[in-house]
Amino acid sequence: MTSKKRILSAIQPTGDMHFGNYFGAVQNWVRLQEQYDCVYGVVDYHAMSMPYNPKKLRENTWSILFNLIAVGVDVDNLFIQSLVPEHAELSWIFNCFCSYGQLSRMTQFKDKSQQSKEKATDAFISAGLFGYPVLQAADILIYRADYVPVGKDQEQHLELTRNIAERFNKQVGKDYFVLPETLYTEVPKVMSTADPARKMSKSAGEKHHINVFADEARIRKQIKSAVTDTGQATEGMSAGVENLFSLLGASGKKEAYEYLRTCYQNGTLKYSELKAEVAEGLVGLSAVFKDRKAAIEQDKKNIKNQIKASSAQIRKRAQETVKEVKELTGLANVRF
Ligand code: AMP
């Protein structure tokens, strides 16, 4: 038994990892591994909540796992959500501890259902999208996680997770679930460089996210065309410039950051110079990750087996929780 505090976080296998994922969450995943007992999932059940391609889902799941390992996540800490079906079982139970009204207020549901409507005339908004935060609560609570390193976009879902845990504990008359806390990175919200009013996101489309593993030329191009000023009068720094500074700081270019910040204060900042430094920072990080990924590609079979084994190992914890939850809620149990 370990006495370390527990961490759970997850990512969806919907295309490549972008710098919003990396700076907002995954960079923290890597750092936290030394200090905490960490469990990180690739949540393929969640990826089914929006229209998706079944042929691509499994391919994307493996691809994001390789990406996570390339940026420094330890294989033993990784699992695939659908290899731990207890998540879905606990999610059903939690559906009964969460109100319809609460779920209707979730901004992610509102945003994503709006995106579906914009993309298709026959928009299909699944009940899975509506119930997404309940499954997320199950992902977290099933491991009795103390902390959840996520981006700021997940704040509302974490609040809901605590509500579910509280309602559950009250109903069963026991402080069974820990109320998990969020852990934010220094850059809790990365904005789209093409539209700094919205967050960097895969589902918003190609130009709204910068892939961590993209070609150098593409990264440079995306930063070069980043929106700085919209022409509208704003008080202080514009959202676009602020986002570029965040990216610069997060990419580890502290000196350039300090220097350009002073230029900004003196009114001598050239956007082209800021963009060149940001591009340099992102390209530098990306190059290291791409090298590691190339090595992983050579050893795929072995790594897949390791992930299957770690998923089986992590599943044991989930099974233990579900067994206890069934006991507490009056459901039939193996010991029944
Ligand atoms: P997702 O790709 O939606 O599964 O998100 C995976 C992780 O990345 C979550 O912890 C999110 O909070 C985080 N994340 C996604 N987009 C952003 C963003 N634009 N800024 C900061 N964090 C983000």
Image (spheres, rainbow, N blue to C red):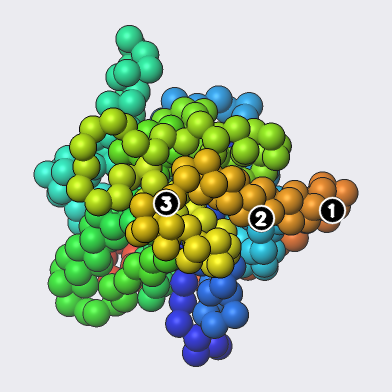
Task: Look at discs 1 and 2 and give the one toward the viewer.
Answer: 2
Residue type at the position of mark 2 = Leu
Q: Which mark is residue 295?
A: 1
Where residue 92 appears, as percent x and y from the top left, is 32, 49
Residue 210: x %, y % from top left: 55, 39
- Tell me which amino acid carries mark 1: Ala
> Within 8 Å of ligand 1, the CB of disc 3?
no
Helix, strand, or loop for circle 3? loop
User: Would you name the residue on which mark 2 appears?
Assistant: 285
Could you tell which of marks 1 and 3 lies nearer the N-terminus?
3
Judge left or right: residue 236 versus residue 196. Answer: left
Q: Are marks 2 and 3 in contact (CB under 8 Å)?
A: no
User: Who's the residue at 52% across and 80% down the image?
Assistant: 36
Is residue 290 found left or right of 53 in the rendered image? right
Whole-number angstrom distance, CA of label 1 to CA of label 3: 44 Å
Circle 2 packing at 10 Å, graded few (<14), some (14-19), many (20+), is some
> How far is mark 2 from mark 3, CA to CA?
28 Å
* Mark closer to the chain start, 1 or 2: 2
Residue 199 visible, this angle: no
Q: Is residue 27 above or below residue 271?
A: below
Mark earlier in primary sequence (2, 3):
3
Q: Could you classify mark 1 by the number of other residues whose Cα lies within 10 Å: few (under 14), some (14-19), or many (20 or more)?
A: few
From the image, tell me which residue sits under label 3: 268
